[in-house]
Image: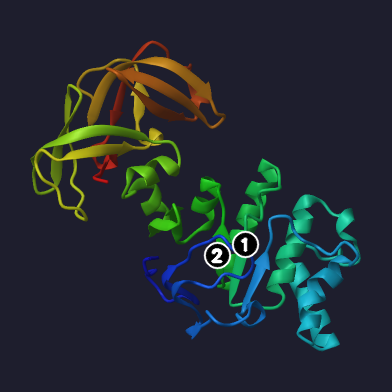
Amino acid sequence: MVPPVPEAVHLRVSHVTKRFGGVGFYDPDAGDIEIGGRRVNDLPAHRRGTAMVFQDYALFPHMTVRDNVAYGLRVAHVGSSDRQRRVDETLSFVGLTGLGDRWPSQLSGGQQQRVAVARALVIEPQVLLLDEPLSNLDAKLREQLRVELRIMQRRLGMTFIYVTHDQAEALSLSDWIAVMNKGKVEQAGAPWEIYYHPRTAFLADFVGAVNLVPATIADLAAETVTVTFGRHQAAVRRPSEVPLAAGQDVRLCVRPESLTIAAPAAGANGVTLQGSIVRRAFLGDTMRYWVKVDDREWIVDQADPGGSAALDGPVSVSVRPDRVHLITA
C-alpha cells in the first residue's frame, strides 16, 4: 500500500496489488487508481489523461521536430491554428525555439529528450509518466536536464511520476519518493525523510552511502536513548515514531557527511570515536575516508577537501547526537 501524500494531488493509488508475468496493459488484482478524482482502472490508456516520456526518446525518425510534437494533437483532432500555437508555445517552453524543422537525427541526445518531453506536455495531461528519461545521457547533461525538469514541473504544477534507479535523481527531483522492495513500498515520504530517517536497514543502505552499526539500548530518557555498540556507549536522539525498550537491539544509521574527521583528540563534542584510516578516495567535491574503529570500518566524507591536506593514520571521528538515527527494522 502506498501511504497517502500530505496534500491534494491529481493522482491517488489505493491498496493496489499486482502479480506480474504477462504482456501488455496490466490491470490491478486489487485496489483503485484515481486521477483527478476519477477512477481509471478500466479506462484505456488514451482516456486516462496521462502522457509518457520513454527512456529511449521514441521519436518518429520520419517526422520533423514540429511534427513529432504535434502528433498527439493531430490524433486528438485539434484544429490547425490551435495546434500550431500550442506546438510553438511548448517548443519555447522546453528551449527548442527555432528547431522545429529539424529531423531527430540532427539533434543531440539532450535535444531529442526535450522533444520527447514537449510531445508529452503539449497534450496537457493531468499526470506525466517518465520512465528513466535521462539514463541514456552523459552525467553532465543528466544533471542539467534534471534541473530543467524540476523547473518545468514547478511552473506547470503538474504531477510527474518519475521512475529511476538513480538515487541522486530521485532525491533532487522529487517532492515525494516511494522506494519499492520486492514489489512492495518499503517507505514513502519526502526526500529528506527517506534519506536521513529511513525506517528499515534495507532503505538506509539502498539510498546512498551509510554507516549501519548494530547496537543495544542501555537506557531510555525523555529525549535521548543511551546505546552501546562494541566497547562504546553514547546518548543519541530518541525517535518519537517508534516504541523502544531497554535491551532492544537496534542499528545506528549515520550518513558519511554527518561525521567529522580530524587528528586524534579527546573530549570532542558529540559521539567521538578513535580509529585509523585504512583507505581514502578523492571524489572531487569530497574526500571519502574508510576509518577502522575496533573491528568495523566507518565511511566518512570530508567536504571541500582541497582546502587541507589529506589525512592519514590515526584520527578522531565524531558526530552530533541528533545526526544519529535509530533503526529497529
Q: Is residue 28 left or right of residue 188?
A: right
Q: Position of residue 13 (x, y in %)?
A: 45, 72
Q: Which mark is residue 130?
A: 1
Graded by Cα atoms within 10 Å as few (under 14), some (14 to 19) or many (20 or more), the crowding at tag 2 reads some
Give the mark nearest the N terminus, 2 or 1.
1
Measure the alpha-carbon separation of dots 2 and 1.
6 Å
Quadrant including the N terminus: bottom left
Q: Is residue 109 left or right of residue 21?
A: right
In the figure, residue 89 lies in which quadrant?
Answer: bottom right
Q: Position of residue 88 (x, y in %)?
A: 80, 74
In the figure, residue 178 lies in which quadrant?
Answer: bottom left
Observer able to see residue 269? no
Observer able to see residue 108? yes
Residue marked by disc 2? 161
Considering only vertical position in the picture, is 93 above or below 315?
Answer: below
Whether pointer 2 and pointer 1 mark residues with C-beta atoms closer than 8 Å, the reply is yes
Task: In this rendered view, identify the residue nearer to me: 229 or 151.
Answer: 229
Q: Residue visible at 87% across and 67% down?
A: 100
Graded by Cα atoms within 10 Å as few (under 14), some (14 to 19) or many (20 or more), the crowding at tag 1 reads some
Residue type at the position of mark 1: Leu
